[in-house]
Amino acid sequence: MDKDELVEYFRTQVRQDPEVPSAVAAIRTLLEFLKRDQTGETILGLRENLTQTIRRLEEADSSVAVSSGGELFLRFISLTSLEHPDLSQCKKVMVERGELFLKKISLSRSKVAKLCHTFIKDGAKILTHSSSRVVLKVLESAAADKKRFTVYVTESQPDSAGRQMADKLQNLNIPVTVVLDAAVGYIMEKVDLVIVGAEGVVESGGIINKIGTYQLAVCSKAHNKPFYVVAESFKFVRLYPLNQQDVPERFKYKADTLKAVEDLAEEHPMIDYTPPSLITLLFTDLGVLTPSAVSDELIKLYL
Amino acid sequence: GTSVVVYMVPQYSSIHIAAVVVSMFSTIICGFLFLLVVKRLPEHVQVDDPAVVKRLAKKLERQQIPLRSDYGYKVSLFSHLHQYSRKAPLTQLLSIPSTVIHPSIVRLGLQYSQGIVAGSNARSVALLHAFKQVIRDYTTPPNEELSRDLVNKLKPYISFLNQCRPLSASMGNAIKYIKKEISNIPSQCKEEEAKTKLLTCIDRYIEEKIVLAAKAISKYAIEKISDGDVILVYGYSSLVNNILCEAFEKSRKFRVIVVDSRPRLEGREALRRLVQRGISCTYVLISALSYILPEVSKVFLGAHALLANGYVMSRVGTSQIALVARTYNVPVLVCCETYKFCERVQTDSFVSNELDDPDDLMVTRKGKTQLENWQDVSSLGLLNLVYDVTPPDFVDLVITDLGMIPCTSVPVVLRVKNLDQ
């Protein structure tokens, strides 16, 4: 499977099922690559090929989730004893584990929704940022539980993703209002809680998410409103940013911008980093975690 | 419980007596287990309790080690700690030749108490080398097993070193490791073989936990140093110096601000070594900290020990630097090897600390020595603290040989390490 086939397969996955997280699409692509790969002669060669594939997928879609999902997939499949003398046997074991991993993480979104919707009380006013499919699932389960609540969504420029979220919520008959990004401070006194998704959860317990999340977190801290993050466990990534500058450039901008533009100082970043001190709780398929427990889970996942 | 049972019984039948006896035994056993589980406070932080001091004196007499006496007036908040004078080293009270203590241990004790060997890593490595010499010169007495006798031989040495200067957390962990290795020697092992095995174990410990750990920490730390950074360091930490020199060799462009404090003025040593490499440095005293901090982009600190609740124990002044850096929103990075992690919990700098020689605070300028006659003033006490603890909220990142972890994850690392062993 060469580079263009890979990217095409990945894009088809995303196109066919817009609900699928980009990390799951990436992992399906990796699994497909593993099944079709004929060039790997040794386990080390296979790993090399898989790592290179992950790099190529990151070039196609520069979100943090693709990077973290790919790394976790690699860890998961190589965690078994690969002691068989026959390479095809080893590959079969790896493919089996890959399928198992895929099945586990496909269910993670519903697990998160089940944990989180109990925190939404009747009559709550929720503020969310941009468009997140996990948050949508959470609000969907809360609505299915016959809870009445209103949602405020920030418009989230430059791509107005907030408006898409508002449309989806209206289809679910949830009362929703779109607010300007600049109106977050204004609206904060009216809301009861803030729920956002995450593109990546870093080692310190902080999150990387659409630009504007950090402002939202600072405002909610100032007003003493709980700030909840919902994220699946495959978004946990081994980064440790100290501040906004410390987030690697390859995550900050879209993949096309990175390839096309020479001087990135002129571009606007698409994501920002929210430190753990501003986050109240994280809802993941591993359970409800405090930011300091994220490092504990990461050590268990990666070591 | 036992008395209640007896009173409720009108007649003493055999079953009732049996019940009484069983409950008595269970309370005794519970009390015994309680004593086993609850750790006693170490003696060196209970100096104001005369019963503890008497017990310690008896133990030292049994081991034939002289007791070092305290010097000068102690500030009342710290009266539970020892305060020794450098002018009266313990070795003056030893008989020559000492029959109990190995000469390399005597030399080591003198080096500790006079401050010739200072710094957490340096002290641990010197200790391990001295123990290697002890093991080389050791012969098992007849009818004794090496695994038990050698451990008993080490106990008076450790008491002696403790008297010269209280043991650091890293030294404590090293001693625990050696004792474990010695007691794991199988009894059928021949003496020469056992000794070589122990020597290789010690060499491997130094190589893995100190030398290679420093390399791993430098690798992670260099990722956090970007071009154009202004890095602040405090005092002299061998690990932080190593990191900065490695980063400079990898052609990172940065400059360093060295913060120093009296009376040790360790920053001068750090400054000398950095300037020798060609790194551009600035030198300030800690009183100028808030003046210099707006220029700083990162703070790198070393640690003496990392406690189980995430507090960082380091040279006095470190918590001040972390506090002011937090106010200016400057990231604080602590670099610490995992062998310095200890299971102790401390939330303040009072309960367990070290008091250095108060005469160090006397300073001679223009021929006049201030505070020369401080002993004559009855209400004057000089306090020369060595360590302080920094809360984890002031520390952004801890770089260890296992990777970069937040300060709150220290108990996780301790748990993982215990599982490995």
Image: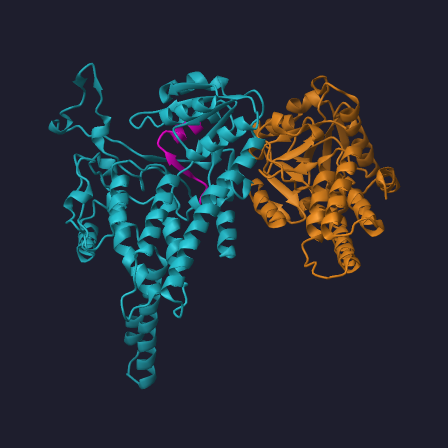
Chain colours: A orange, B cyan
Which one is nearer the viewer's eye here, B151 or B399?
B151
Name the residue furthest front. Answer: B192
Give the total number of marks visible in the rendering: 0
Which one is nearer the viewer's eye here, A196 or B95?
B95
User: Could you say which quadrant of the image residue B364 lies in?
Assistant: top left
x 19%, y 44%: residue: B91
* Residue A94 shows in this picture: yes
Q: Is residue A18 left or right of residue B85?
A: right
* Residue A198 shows in this picture: no
Q: Is residue A152 left or right of residue B212?
A: right
Q: Quadrant of the N terminus of chain A?
A: top right
User: Could you say which quadrant of the image residue B264 lies in?
Assistant: top left
Residue B338 at x, y percent in the picture? 47, 45
x 28%, y 71%: residue: B143
Name the residue furthest bottom. Answer: B14
Residue A76 at x, y percent in the picture? 69, 51
Specify whether residue B133 is painted magenta. no
Specify whether residue B310 is painted magenta. yes
Give the magenta range.
B308-323
Residue A75 at x, y percent in the picture? 68, 49
